[in-house]
Image (cartoon, rainbow, N blue to C red):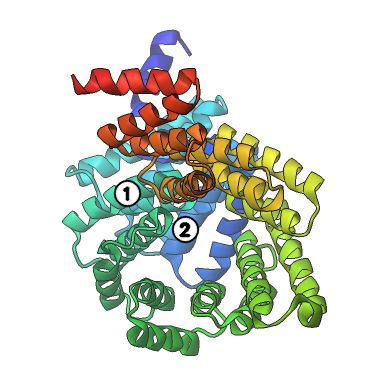
Amino acid sequence: MSSTQDTSLKTSLLQLECHFTWALDKNDTDLTDLLNRLEEQLNLDLGREAGVARTHCCMGYVKFLLGSNTEAVSYFEKSVELTKSHGNDCDKLLVVVYGDLAWLYYHMGNFAECESYLNKLREINEKYPTVPYAEVLGEKGWTFLKFSRKYYERAKECFKKALELEPDEGEWNAGLAIALYRIEDFLQDTSSSNAIDQLRRAIATNPDDDVLKVLLGLKLASRKRYSEAESLVEQALESSPEHPHVIRYVGKFFRNRGSVDRSIALLKRALEKVSNSAFIHHQLGLCYKKKILNLKQAGSHHTKGAEINRAQEQCIYHLEMATEMKPSFIVAMRELAIQYGENRDMPRAEEMFQNTFRVAREKNDNYQSVHLYYADFQQYCMRCESAAIEHYIECLKINPKRYEGKKSAERLEGIAKRRIKNNPMDGEAFGILGIIHKEKGEKQQAIECFETALSFVDNEDYLSDLCELRLSLQ
């Protein structure tokens, strides 16, 4: 093939809508874990040709990312077969997988097959010239939801655009509801909720989807609307008592409501159905963490010691399983590090934290939260306040408006006020307050704190911050 032909072919490929052109960065996900989740999804989607076809298509792309081109071809071809089983009117549903096959054959050097799939796509475009297709936007949205938490906003926009074209389509309504739920859950935003209204709409268009009912129950419970929440959760559990996604979210619901033992029983039942779920192991770890706290509050360590130890062992076991199954599971890793600390295994705690920092840096994900957890570890387990202050400040500076930033500000303020109460001339404590005010954008209060700090200590950083703040107010 001449360079001119190759350039022309590449230009055509770049215009396609498929996994290869959606800017999916393999460093943003754990490919092995993603493959496990997709295989789990296959089992849940049996009987739903559209869902199974979509999952095969996504698995084909993951196999390509893992370097298994032959397996990738097999998954893509299976996706085509399943899609065609819908009937004659399935052309729009083939756009993504045909695009994937064109790209895959291009990478394999089989340019004749590549051109063949490009021709199939041209025929579909001639038949349906009005683009974009809702089917393609929907598949793109589901891919973003599956691939990485970083893509939830992109998923939301895809489903919104699909719903502009097909407002009553159940799949796109469900996709948007799940995207909104996950975005709000990640941001820990309790001020308002777009997810609640969208979940209600999604349930109206998918009345048999019990996962959506549990998610709505979780959202309502977070806003203290417990009666309706419990009714939805009970309905879902009664209708889908063996569905692992229903069981695990119901388990989360009962843990949040304080029914830890019931949650543990449900999650263990789910684990029997899906043994390789890092998510369920993580949820069980959190349940046992909650159980430890409950036991400590219920009686003295002397009377509850053996039970606390068993719960601690189970907590660590399930968190270790979660991180073993998904080595980049930062949320589980940081929790496991804390639990090693609680178990007085400081070397393993420190090693796990350093590993968690490394993964968070590499993936540019959850870095702020790791600073908060490590600061808590230094403050409460290691009793090293100077190291705790350093990491609380790092956490605060990353984003003072996020949950982790606000928590760090609270911790720092508590430390500073305690120290000032013990020593009204503690310059560093006033400097800490100055940093808090500065990061929050409260410039005048920051200036006053830095001035007070400098009256007691010589500190170049405080002086630099003070000069910067004064200049900004001129």
Q: Residue at x 47, y 17 (%)?
A: 460
Question: Which is more toward the observer, 404 or 424?
Answer: 424
Element assignment for label 2: helix
Q: Is residue 72 visible?
A: no
Q: Looking at the picture, how far across and down is residue 293, in whole percent?
A: 64, 72
> Does residue 19 appear left or right of residue 370 in this picture?
left
Q: Residue at x 60, y 59 (%)?
A: 39
The furthest residue to the top: 3
The residue that disc 1 covers is: 136
Q: What amino acid is at disc 2?
A: Ala
* Label 2: few (<14), some (14–19) or many (≥20) C-alpha neighbours in 10 Å: many
Question: Which is more toward the observer, 445 or 54?
Answer: 445
* Label 1: few (<14), some (14–19) or many (≥20) C-alpha neighbours in 10 Å: many
Residue 4 to residue 384: above or below = above
The residue that disc 2 covers is: 53
Tell me how far mark 2 sits from mark 1, CA to CA: 13 Å
Question: Is tag 2's residue or tag 1's residue first in the polypeptide sequence?
Answer: 2
Residue 258 to residue 376: above or below = below
> Does residue 186 appear left or right of residue 75 in this picture?
left
Q: Looking at the picture, how far across and down is residue 346, in whole percent?
A: 78, 48
Residue 360 to residue 415: above or below = above
> Does residue 169 appear left or right of residue 368 in this picture?
left
Q: Looking at the picture, how far across and down is residue 236, in whole percent?
A: 44, 84
Q: Residue at x 68, y 72 (%)?
A: 292
Question: Which is more toward the observer, 346 or 71?
Answer: 346
